[in-house]
Amino acid sequence: MSSRARGPSAGRQEAAPPAPSALAAKIRRLAPSMTRSMQRVAEAVAGDPAGCAALTVTGLAERTGTSEATVVRTSRLLGYPGYRDLRVALAALAAHQAAGRPPAVTADIAVDDPLAEVVAKLAQDERQSLADTAAALDVVQLEAAVGALATAHRVDVYGVGASGLVGQDLVQKLLRIGLIAHAHADPHLAVTNAVQLRPGDVAVAISHSGRTTDAIEPLRVAFERGATTVAITGRPDGEVAQYADHVLTTSAARESELRPAAMSSRTGQLLVVDCLFIGVAQRTYDVAAPALAASYEALAHRHAHRAAAR
């Protein structure tokens, strides 16, 4: 069993405070996990950054009907040492918005929306998911995960449902550049394979909620066997992060009646997968380029036959 310390921050450096441009995305991502009083503070600063930046900690507490302690706790949860630091970020965010770049807001899809409006709303939601994921993604953690994958003896990927589809996409990409990779959607096979992992191998768990047992359990086993572990999740404070050496955070899913979170979360996950793939391909280019060319050549006749049959 591995002797590595566990916990959401085990083996990872404290993240730097988010840039002002990333603050709105972080509020959207963390709001569901906050207490109701902290949500009121978060909603206030997200809705009126300029107005809140002008308030003292006492003023913001009075405006939101909370306490000064709640304001400070919210500031720290958002990644700032204290409220003074959050005020500076809010002022910068207000200036950013005043320059004509307000954060996009996507309305829920109604059952009677015209299809053209559905297309527009979905397209906007996809753009927002990608922007939020890019803002939340820790490049230091991404670089570390890329480095581990580039030198891995073997890669196991765990995920179920929509996350399982994303896992298959990652594995398919890694296989085409010459890595030995396997996607495991069956939880029993996932654990069985995780038992065989050793130092030098990499295990990747994909769970938007951070609570998916069928992804967490094999990641835990891989962690204890000494493999390098990576979590792709919308909840970096979730259980899956306890067994991850590197955590890659995706955007918060905007769930609605006609669009479950599993659908909207997949957009951010696929962006992370593409970032991992490109990073690994860059680091292993001398091997990856010939392998990718060989895979294209091996499949070319299949595409030619289909084209001729049309």
Image (cartoon, helix red, strand yellow):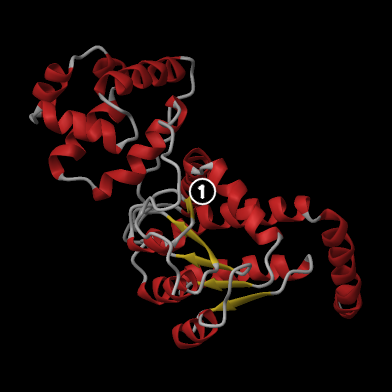
**Quadrant position of the C terminus in the picture:** bottom right
Can residue 307 be seen from the camera position used here?
Answer: no
Place of residue 253 in the rendered image (x, y in percent of width and height, measured from the top left): 39, 53
Q: Nearer the viewer, residue 159 or 16?
A: 16
Q: Nearer the viewer, residue 75 or 111?
A: 75
How many labels sit on residues? 1
Place of residue 184 in the rendered image (x, y in percent of width and height, measured from the top left): 54, 79
**Quadrant position of the N terminus in the picture:** bottom left
Helix, strand or loop at mark 1: helix
Place of residue 273 in the rendered image (x, y in percent of width and height, measured from the top left): 60, 57
Occupied quadrant, residue 13: top left
Look at mark 1 in the image and give the residue it sits on.
Answer: 126
Tell me which residue sits at (74%, 69%) in the image.
179
Amino acid at circle 1: Glu
**In the image, residue 197 above or below residue 107:** below
Q: Residues within 10 Å of mark 1 (few under 14, many from 20)?
A: some
Which residue, as the protein is rendered here, is positioned at the far front? 3
Tell me which residue sits at (77%, 68%) in the image.
176
**In the image, residue 263 above or below residue 133:** below
Can residue 258 be seen from the camera position used here?
Answer: yes
Occupied quadrant, residue 81: top left
Horizontal arrangement in the rendering, residue 162 relative to residue 283 (left or right) = left
Place of residue 229 in the rendered image (x, y in percent of width and height, measured from the top left): 51, 63
Which residue, as the protein is rendered here, is positioned at the far top? 54
